[in-house]
Amino acid sequence: MTERKEKAGNIKANAPAIPLHQEKHLIKEFVHTHHALISVFSREIGISPVKLQLLHEFLHAGQDGLGVINLASRLGVTPALVTRQVQELEQKGWLKRRGDSSDGRRSIVYLTEKGENEVTKIHERAHLFEKTLTSDIPDSDIAAVISTLKILRNKLRLSQVTGVKLINGKVVDNIE
C-alpha cells in the first residue's frame, strides 16, 4: 500500500462532529475546507484554481465583460497574473478581448461561446463532485451548514455596505 493510500485510510470520513459551542475556530474550518475543495476539484478537472476563479468571474460578468485590473482587484491578485491566465484562456479560445469604447487604453475580456460551453461543463462536473462528496451527509446537516453560511455572508455584506467593523462596531474609514 502506498503512503498516500495509508494516509487516506487513516482519515475518517464519518468522524464525530464537534458541537459548535465547543468549536472555537469555525471560520478556520471553513477556510481549510474551501481550500481543500478547490484544490481537489481543480485537480480532478485539470484546471488551476486561479483559472476556475477567473472563469467564475467572467461567467457572472456576462456580456459586460471585465477589465484585467478590475478582475485582479476582485480576486486579490496582480494584474500580471490575471494577464497571463487570460492569455492562456484566449489561446484555448475560451476568452476574447475587445477594446473599451470609453477608454481606448484598456480592453474588456469576455467569455467566448466555446468558453461558455466549457464553463457549463465545469459547472455540471461541480454538481456531480458535490453530490458525490456529500452523499453520506444527512440533508438536515447540509441545510444547517447552508443556513450558517448565509448568516455569516449576510453579516459580512452588511459590514461591507455600512463600513461598521464586526469586531468593535466602529465605522471603518480605511484598513490600516
Image (cartoon, rainbow, N blue to C red):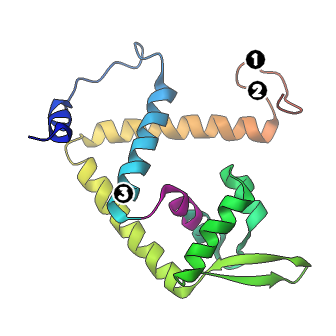
Whether residue 136 sits left or right of residue 34 in the image: it is left
Instruction: Read off the magenta span.
Output: 47-55
Rendering quarter of residue 4: top left
The three-letter amino acid code for the residue at tag 2 is Lys
Residue 52 seen by the camera:
yes
Above or below: residue 9 compared with residue 122: above
- Tag 1–tag 3 contact (CB < 8 Å): no
Q: Secondary structure at mark 1?
A: loop
What residue is drawn where x is 39% and y is 47%? 37
- Tag 1–tag 2 contact (CB < 8 Å): yes
**Circle 2: is it few (<14), some (14-19), or many (20+) Cα within 10 Å?**
some
Residue 132 screen position, x and y as percent: 24, 54
Residue under label 3: 43
Instruction: Indicate which disc, 2 or 3, sits on the residue closer to the N terminus.
Output: 3
**Residue mark closest to the camera, 1 vs 3:** 3
Residue 113 screen position, x and y as percent: 54, 87
Q: Nearer the viewer, residue 70 or 152?
A: 70
Instruction: Indicate which disc, 1 or 3, sits on the residue closer to the N terminus.
Output: 3
Q: Secondary structure at mark 2?
A: loop
What residue is drawn where x is 55% and y is 64%? 56
Above or below: residue 126 compared with residue 176: below
- Which label was assigned to residue 165? 2
